[in-house]
């Protein structure tokens, strides 16, 4: 029952059934929100309860916050802050920053035939089901032959590994292990930044509108730092360990001691060419390594012999 000729926002009036229809909530849900204090009580007119545009707006706010992942208890706190005049603009802005994409990569779509072609041309229902479980692929409603790919880069890496001979089951197992380790890193980074940066803005629950807006601005500034730090440290670690693994396979002396760090050493071009002419380009690195180790062993033996001679001399003089 709405007032004729007047805007809905000014004098709109609804029975509970009408309010449910317009808001998308059920009558039972509306009554539950009233009992929880999330929704103002309706105006009583005779035997009927009358709801207005404020009730409709509040229901839409609640639905939006639920979609953002808030619980009803936290929604009640936020709405109480709103009613007290503290506003929700900053809070919702902070939520949008945190829940928005943390990468510039855009999702793509792939058909089942294209997926099969990427991974050797053979259909593998078990592998596809595991990829969906891991979130590497997402089913498209109503399309059994098409998938959403949240991270095309991640799928491309899997395809390259498979082309190099890595079984799909090993790839998915590696991803599970890697995901657990990365989630630990993300959790620690969040704890670190919360302690040293965000604690002063999030002290109130819910935060004030101004503090929430400032925190949202900081999220925008600090968001790239986690990935940049991980990228730099991963590059450093990969170089260190890849060098050690190469050293292990080029020599028969075993791996480098734990904690040692490989360093590049520039050699004269003439030396490298001479070694390649002697043993071949494919064996040059192993030859140089072996020659270096032999020289170190010889010098170590010389030093030990020298110390032994000095000790013998001392003994004779005594």
Image (tube, grey):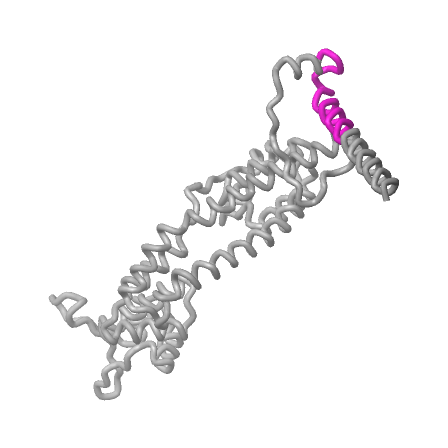
Q: Residue furthest right?
A: 316
Considering only vertical position in the picture, is 260 above or below 60?
above
**Residue 298 colored in magenta in the image:** no
Give residue 289's position: percent from left, percent from top.
Answer: 72, 27
**53 or 16, which lies in front?**
53
Q: How many marks?
A: 0
Q: Indicate the quadrant where residue 311 lies.
A: top right
Front-lying residue, 100 or 198: 198
Q: Residue at x 25, y 71 (%)?
A: 86
- In this rendering, is residue 47 above or below 103? below
Percent position of residue 30, x then y = 35, 75
Q: Residue furthest bottom?
A: 46
- Residue ID at (56%, 33%): 114
Q: Position of residue 296 (x, y in %)?
A: 75, 30
Q: Is residue 115 left or right of residue 314?
A: left
The C terminus lies in which quarter of the figure? Answer: top right
In which image quadrant can residue 12 be found? bottom left
Q: Is residue 89 above or below residue 248?
A: below
| Residue drawn at 37 percent across, 82 percent down | 35
The front one of 240 and 266 is 266
Q: Could you say which is closer to the camera, residue 317 or residue 180?
A: 317
Outermost residue, left side: 5
- Give, as a single range, the part of the protein colored magenta: 277-296
Residue 269, given in percent of the width and then of the height, sits at 61, 15
Give the position of the N terminus as an image quadrant: bottom left
Is 17 left or right of 236, judged from the image as shown?
left
Q: Which residue is rendered at x = 41% and y = 75% of the image? A: 73
- In this rendering, the answer to whether 66 lies above or below 279 is below
In terms of secondary structure, what is the magenta stretch mainly? Answer: helix
């Amino acid at each position: 029952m709405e007032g004729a000729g007047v805007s809905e926002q000014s004098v709109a009036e609804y029975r509970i059934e009408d309010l449910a229809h317009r808001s998308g909530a059920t009558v039972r849900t509306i009554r539950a929100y009233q009992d929880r204090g999330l929704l103002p009580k309706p105006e009583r007119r005779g035997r009927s309860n009358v709801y207005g545009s404020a009730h409709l707006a509040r229901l839409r706010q609640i639905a939006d916050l639920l979609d953002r992942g808030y619980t009803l208890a936290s929604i009640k706190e936020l709405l109480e802050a709103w009613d007290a005049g503290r506003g929700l603009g900053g809070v919702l802005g902070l939520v949008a920053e945190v829940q928005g994409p943390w990468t510039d990569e855009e999702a793509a779509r792939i058909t089942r035939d294209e997926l099969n072609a990427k991974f050797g041309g053979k259909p593998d229902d078990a592998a596809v089901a595991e990829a969906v479980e891991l979130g590497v692929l997402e089913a498209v409603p109503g399309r059994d032959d098409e998938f959403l790919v949240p991270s095309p880069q991640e799928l491309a890496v899997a395809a390259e590994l498979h082309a190099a001979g890595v079984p799909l089951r090993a790839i998915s197992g590696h991803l599970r292990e890697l995901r657990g380790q990365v989630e630990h890193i993300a959790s620690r980074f969040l704890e670190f930044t919360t302690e040293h940066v965000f604690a002063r803005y999030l002290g109130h629950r819910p935060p004030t509108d101004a503090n929430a807006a400032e925190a949202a601005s900081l999220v925008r500034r600090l968001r790239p730092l986690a990935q940049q730090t991980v990228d730099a440290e991963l590059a450093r670690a990969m170089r260190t360990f890849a060098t050690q693994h190469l050293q292990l396979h080029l020599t028969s002396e075993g791996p480098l001691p734990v904690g040692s760090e490989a360093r590049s050493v520039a050699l004269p071009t003439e030396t490298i060419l001479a070694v390649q002419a002697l043993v071949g380009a494919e064996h040059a690195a192993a030859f140089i390594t072996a020659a270096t180790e032999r020289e170190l062993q010889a010098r170590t033996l010389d030093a030990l012999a020298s110390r032994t001679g000095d000790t013998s001399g001392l003994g004779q003089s005594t």
